[in-house]
Amino acid sequence: MSLDSEALLDLSLSRGTLNRNGLGRRDGDPVAAALANSDTRIVDLTGGRALTCRVDGQLRLVHRAPRFADSAAQTLYLGHDVDGTDYVAVLHEEGDPGAEAPPGRGWRNLREAGAELDDLESGVLTTAVALANWHARHQFCPRCGALTVVEEGGWVRRCTVDGSQHYPRTDAAIIVAVTDPDERILLARGPHWPEGRMSVLAGFVEAGESLEAAVHREVMEEVGLTLTDLTYRGNQPWPFPASLMVGFRARAEQTRLTLDETEIVEASWFTRGELSFAARSGQVALPPRVSIARILIEHWHGGPIEAASDVATTADPRAAR
């Protein structure tokens, strides 16, 4: 594997400037301390969505000051900004009557909002979603099955029986833009994706496996290609529910595809012109702009690609979920 001589990809969810305050949150109850301070910024989260608005064209999270009722809600300490202002996520059930968006504001998930938020707020929302997803899936001890309780503001769960501590997990996954000797890019569709939706190849890193080995294995298993010129391009948190996407580009030594149909139901090589036309016409739906997949594709393309799927998502935010 080589390191690219160019700058690494500019990935929207990787630029977060939020200070997680790892040492400070061990002292006492960081949530209680934050809720007692009227300067603390609260981010309400329901079903992975946060309230947003536009200020002078810039998408922003809608923050608020703490309320008395927040102390009885499920809360997560996220960290603080450069000025020392704390951020806390308050989690609400789906369908909560308080989740109705006032005029001029809207509930957006990370896929919809992440690419437009600034570096601080992108980090705030990414952290909130990642922690919320972890808590939803890890309420019981993996060692003995007993109930766990939340500590350190939501960054630790402790078993009530054996005392073991458990931390938010992150699953490493590789994602790779594969090109052929003619500079065509390979896009593929998984069996559970809607017709027309395509992306670059990706897969989880297996136990005892390096990132580079995972790239070679996944591409060979899914489409039967051997690779050369493997190059690291950057990484991005992707909390759906708990992944870190590690991006690469590579060149295929041949172009004949042999699909593993349990993983890939369709795969094609595209020239830049072919993909641009297919995306504009709606024949191919590309990944959302917030994703490393889209950035890898557009970096190969040489610039942004106008896609009908982007327009559909803007018109109906539910399309990005």
Image (cartoon, grey):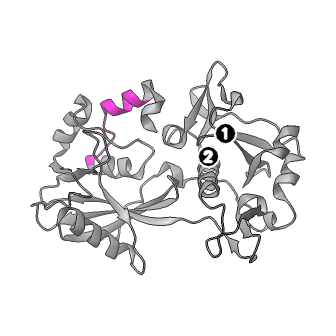
In front of the other: 226 or 49: 49
Tag on residue 93?
1
At a point 49% along the width and 65% down the height, the residue shown is: 171
Question: How far across and down, in percent of the image, does residue 4 sit?
Answer: 35, 66
Q: Which kind of residue does numbered mark 1 sit on?
A: Glu
Pinpoint residue 278: horizontal percent, then vertical percent. 20, 35
The nearer-to-camera label among 1 and 2 is 1
Label 2 residue SS: helix
Q: Earlier in the sequence, mark 1 or mark 2?
A: 1
Magenta residue check for 2: no
Identify the image quadrant of residue 55: top right
Q: Which mark is residue 125?
A: 2
267 up-or-down from 260: above or below:
above
Quarter of the image holding residue 68?
Answer: top right
Magenta-drawn segment: 301-313
Image coordinates for residue 65, horizontal then vertical, percent: 82, 37
Q: Residue 231: x, y in percent? A: 32, 68
Image height check: is 166 above or below 49?
below
Does residue 163 appear anywhere in the picture? yes
Could you say which quadrant of the image residue 303 lies in? top left
